[in-house]
């Protein structure tokens, strides 16, 4: 099974990034990706991980398209592609309105913004843009687009090499994959599935961490939409009304959208991702109790035993 993982959502030190990437490579994970949360750069983190490894894929999960001009995004990703000798995967996303609002960013039409951005990044990376005065003789990196709705999934199929959904249950993933396939045609395409992960032998503590962790994310506008499309609109309504996450987040939601508890008890759920059409589940670890980034990695590795 090809499995990808991310580094911690809240970021970690450069020293820890190197250690995480090396441990992931030695364990046999297919790829390791960095989220992007100000003041951490996903592309910068991908470069650190590329320099620390030799074979594992490295990339972003995901780069905020509003934080960089397309030309610089392409330039930086090409640098990681060169350093890694072809292991870079650039995940692109719109991020979240509350995050972008802090920095005075007007997101405008998010669909059109992504369409324009991905098109420009591709043209700069492959050298086809007429704006370029010089070109880099480097194989083009793969581009993935976050797709939480069928419309954006179709855009990923049309313009990109993969789709990066998150917090979607199996039924909604099928719809997203179908929309992407309809536009991708016969070209090589990666169907990833982002899954929040809370691993510990202390099942009760892992369950509580999962309720709080998913609950904190669930009220972001884009995630409210994907949760509603996954059949959990009632949970979103409870959270919006002020119900605490530990009460609003149901067992059914966690069982369908996350992995929690003992690693040995999570393998069947992980295998279901492949049976459903995912070619690359991407596991996003969250701490249970006081777990450090390296301790979270140790728990992830147990999934491969």
Image (cartoon, rainbow, N blue to C red):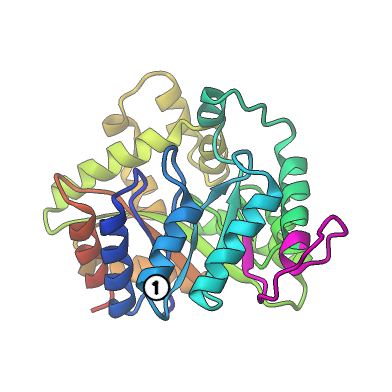
Q: Which residue is mark 1?
A: 271
Residue 174 in view here: yes
Q: Quadrant of the N terminus?
A: bottom left
Residue 303 visible, this angle: no
Residue 143 drawn at (x, y percent): 64, 63
Compared with 234, 42 (above or below) is: below
- Residue that lies at the very extreme toward the left in this rendered image: 202
Residue 77 lies in what quarter of the image?
Answer: bottom right
**Is 94 within the magenta?**
no
Could you classify mark 1 by the number of other residues whose Cα lies within 10 Å: few (under 14), some (14-19), or many (20 or more)?
few
In this view, the residue in front, 144 or 79, is: 79
**Number of dots carrying numbers:** 1
Q: Position of residue 51 (x, y in %)?
A: 40, 69
Judging from the image, what secondary structure is the residue with disc 1 in?
A: helix
**Is 271 on the left-hand or right-hand side of 177?**
left
38 or 183, nearer to the observer? 38
Q: Position of 202 compared to 297: left or right?
A: left
| Closer to the camera in the image, 287 or 121 | 121
Question: Residue at left 34%, top 43%?
Answer: 10
Query: What residue range appears in magenta?
Result: 123-144
Q: Position of residue 251 (x, y in %)?
A: 31, 45
In the rendered image, residue 103, in percent from the top left (x then y), is placed at 55, 26
In the image, residue 114 sits, relative to residue 48, either above or below, namely above
Residue lying farthest right? Answer: 130
């Amino acid at each position: 099974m090809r499995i990808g993982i991310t580094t911690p959502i809240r970021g970690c030190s450069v020293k820890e990034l190197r250690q995480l990437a090396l441990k992931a490579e030695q364990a046999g994970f297919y790829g390791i990706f960095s989220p992007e949360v100000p003041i951490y750069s996903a592309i910068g983190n991908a470069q650190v991980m590329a320099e620390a490894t030799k074979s594992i894929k490295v990339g972003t999960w995901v780069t905020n398209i509003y934080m960089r001009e397309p030309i610089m995004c392409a330039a930086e990703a090409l640098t990681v592609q060169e350093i890694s000798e072809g292991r870079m995967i650039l995940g692109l996303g719109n991020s979240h309105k509350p995050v972008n609002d802090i920095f005075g960013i007007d997101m405008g039409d998010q669909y059109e913004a992504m369409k324009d951005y991905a098109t420009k990044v591709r043209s700069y990376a492959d050298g086809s843009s007429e704006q370029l005065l010089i070109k880099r003789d480097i194989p083009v990196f793969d581009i993935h687009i976050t797709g939480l709705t069928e419309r954006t999934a179709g855009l990923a199929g049309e313009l990109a090499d993969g789709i990066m959904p998150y917090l979607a249950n199996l039924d909604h993933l099928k719809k997203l994959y179908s929309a992407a396939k309809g536009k991708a045609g016969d070209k090589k395409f990666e169907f990833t599935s982002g899954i929040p992960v809370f691993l510990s032998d202390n099942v009760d503590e892992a369950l509580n961490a999962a309720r709080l962790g998913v609950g904190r994310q669930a009220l972001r506008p884009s995630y409210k939409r994907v949760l509603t499309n996954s059949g959990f609109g009632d949970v979103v309504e409870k959270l919006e009304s002020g119900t605490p996450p530990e009460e609003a987040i149901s067992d059914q939601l966690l069982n369908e959208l996350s992995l929690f508890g003992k690693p040995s008890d999570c393998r069947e759920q992980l295998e279901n991702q492949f049976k459903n059409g995912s070619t690359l589940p991407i596991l996003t670890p969250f701490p249970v109790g006081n777990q450090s980034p390296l301790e979270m990695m140790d728990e992830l590795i147990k999934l491969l035993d």
